[in-house]
């Protein structure tokens, strides 16, 4: 006798449907809802495109989390999903049975555990053995309902086929969709393309934004109007792809006006918790404008590969938005032989919260490290520090280790 576990009735039912495509499609209206998730996963992975389209059109739950199944880009499969959604939106049925959320994000969920949803697109376990009885609503109510679409956008160099297809689909149906792109990463594309994309996606729904473009003062000013509308933004990362570009900046009245205009938009980001700025060379002498515009308590501040003057440094300990920092990263930034006592004062301000400090490759010398050591010894929550690729003598390094030896949570020192 075989030791294999026999198939369940559900598995046998799904196998029977997969052997007869026409039967599977015709049976969808009467198919028990509990069979939908497992059947959909099998037909999706098996590329049964006609059944996939029909199942999307007949989807009985508020949420369809298809992104977790789309591990590798496939234009044909993606188009089938969108065609099925179009069919679903055109169907004549009760609003209570209508798909409310299309989740295209590649989230780490087990598909079979997330087949019902709530208004915000999250999932909940509900009893779905029977289709609910819903009262008839007038036809105009059907037309006014919108489908909430949750994509993530990761764009590098240019739009791929799936992204182009999706954006065209969205633009043609913008009156019927609510587009909530919470995570957006855009690399090495022209600023005009960035603005076009941001015109498609509602900026008020973006929570995590990373822009890696060839920044200059005028581009920063162009981006400012978009940035001010991102009222839900929690994490902002601005990186300069042109790391070897000519760095001479002529200070003119227009330059100062553009920079002030751009950084003034930070005051509208009332949810911001993580700010990262990398290799934006024209920030020198403008830390005051950035820091005084912050309105929230940051958890992470990362300013990498930038030059900071003595006047820049003095504003860090004065800023109340930095009083609860957990992560401070100045990797690759240079302090131009400045005294680092203001930075030491900032470390004292965050001694009860700071968990990581990165000053790798800052061209620091003994006197600058000495300015920081007393404050470092008070940072009771520190787990990791990085002082590598600086110019320290052995006696000063020994002094540093003596002061950090009593930090009980410290696990890693570079």
Image: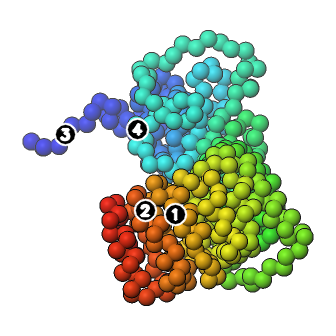
Q: For residue 103, what is the image quadrant?
A: top right
Q: Residue at the location (75% across, 61% down)?
A: 289
Question: Mark number for residue 112?
Answer: 4
From the image, state whether disc 4 or disc 2 is nearer to you.
Answer: 2
| Neighbours of disc 1 within 10 Å: few (<14), some (14-19), many (20+) | many
Give yes or no for contact between labels 4 and 2 (Cβ–Cβ under 8 Å): no
Q: Nearer the viewer, mark 4 or mark 1?
A: 1
Q: Say which element carries label 4.
A: helix
- Asked which quadrant contains residue 330, the reply is bottom right
Residue underneath mark 3: 5
- Whichever of callouts 4 and 3 sits on the residue coming sooner in the sequence is 3
Cα–Cα span, label 2 and label 3: 61 Å
Residue labelled with disc 2: 378
The relative height of residue 210 versus residue 309 in the rendered view (above or below) is: above
Spatial separation of the CA atoms under disc 4 and disc 3: 20 Å
Vertical position of residue 41 compared to residue 23: above or below: below
Query: Which tag is nearer the camera, tag 4 or tag 3?
Result: 4
Is 48 displayed left or right of 196 in the figure? Answer: left
| Pointer 2 with pointer 1, Cβ within 8 A | yes
Q: Nearer the viewer, mark 2 or mark 3?
A: 2
Q: Earlier in the sequence, mark 4 or mark 2?
A: 4
Circle 4 crowding by C-alpha within 10 Å: few under 14, some 14–19, many from 20:
some
Q: Which of the 4 image quadrants contains residue 362?
A: bottom right
Q: Nearer the viewer, residue 81 or 19?
A: 81
Report the Cα–Cα distance between label 3 and label 1: 61 Å
Identify the residue at horizontal 36%, vertical 75% (top origin).
401
Give me the disc on residue 347: 1
Question: In terms of secondary structure, where does tag 3 sit?
Answer: loop
Tell me the residue at 17%/43% (across/down). Answer: 4
Rendered view: 128 above or below 327 = above
């Amino acid at each position: 006798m075989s030791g294999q576990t026999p198939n369940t009735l559900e598995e046998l039912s799904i196998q029977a449907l997969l052997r007869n495509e026409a039967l599977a499609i015709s049976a969808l209206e009467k198919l028990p809802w509990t069979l939908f998730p497992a059947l959909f996963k099998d037909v999706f992975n098996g590329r049964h495109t006609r059944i996939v389209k029909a199942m999307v059109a007949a989807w009985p739950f508020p949420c369809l989390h298809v992104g977790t199944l789309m591990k590798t880009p496939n234009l044909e499969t993606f188009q089938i999903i969108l065609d099925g959604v179009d069919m679903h939106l055109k169907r004549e049925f009760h609003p209570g049975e209508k798909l409310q959320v299309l989740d295209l994000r590649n989230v780490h969920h087990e598909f079979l555990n997330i087949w019902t949803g709530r208004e915000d697109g999250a999932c909940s376990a509900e009893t779905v053995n029977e289709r609910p009885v819903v009262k008839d609503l007038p036809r105009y109510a059907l037309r006014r309902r919108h489908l909430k679409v949750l994509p993530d956008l990761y764009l590098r160099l240019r739009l791929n086929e799936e992204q182009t297809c999706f954006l065209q689909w969205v633009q043609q149906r913008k009156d019927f969709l609510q587009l909530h792109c919470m995570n957006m990463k855009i690399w090495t594309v022209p600023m005009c393309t960035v603005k076009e994309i941001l015109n498609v996606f509602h900026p008020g729904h973006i929570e995590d934004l990373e822009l890696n473009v060839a920044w200059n003062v005028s581009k920063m000013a162009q981006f400012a109007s978009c940035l001010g509308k991102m009222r839900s933004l929690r994490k902002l990362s601005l990186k300069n792809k042109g790391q070897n570009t000519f760095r001479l900046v002529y200070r003119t009245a227009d330059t100062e006006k553009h920079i002030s205009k751009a950084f003034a938009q930070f005051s509208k980001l009332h949810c911001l918790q993580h700010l990262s700025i990398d290799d934006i060379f024209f920030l020198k002498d403008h830390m005051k404008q950035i820091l005084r515009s912050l309105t929230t308590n940051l958890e992470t501040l990362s300013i990498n590969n930038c030059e900071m003057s003595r006047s820049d440094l003095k504003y860090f300990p004065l800023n109340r938005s930095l009083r609860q920092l957990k992560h401070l990263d100045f990797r690759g930034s240079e302090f131009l032989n400045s005294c680092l006592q203001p930075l030491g004062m900032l470390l004292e301000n965050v001694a009860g919260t700071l968990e990581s400090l990165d000053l790798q490759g800052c061209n620091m010398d003994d006197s600058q490290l000495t300015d920081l050591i007393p404050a470092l010894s008070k940072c009771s929550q520190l787990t990791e520090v990085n002082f590598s690729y600086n110019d320290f003598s052995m006696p000063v390094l020994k002094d540093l280790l003596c002061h950090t030896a009593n930090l009980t949570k410290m696990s890693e020192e570079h």
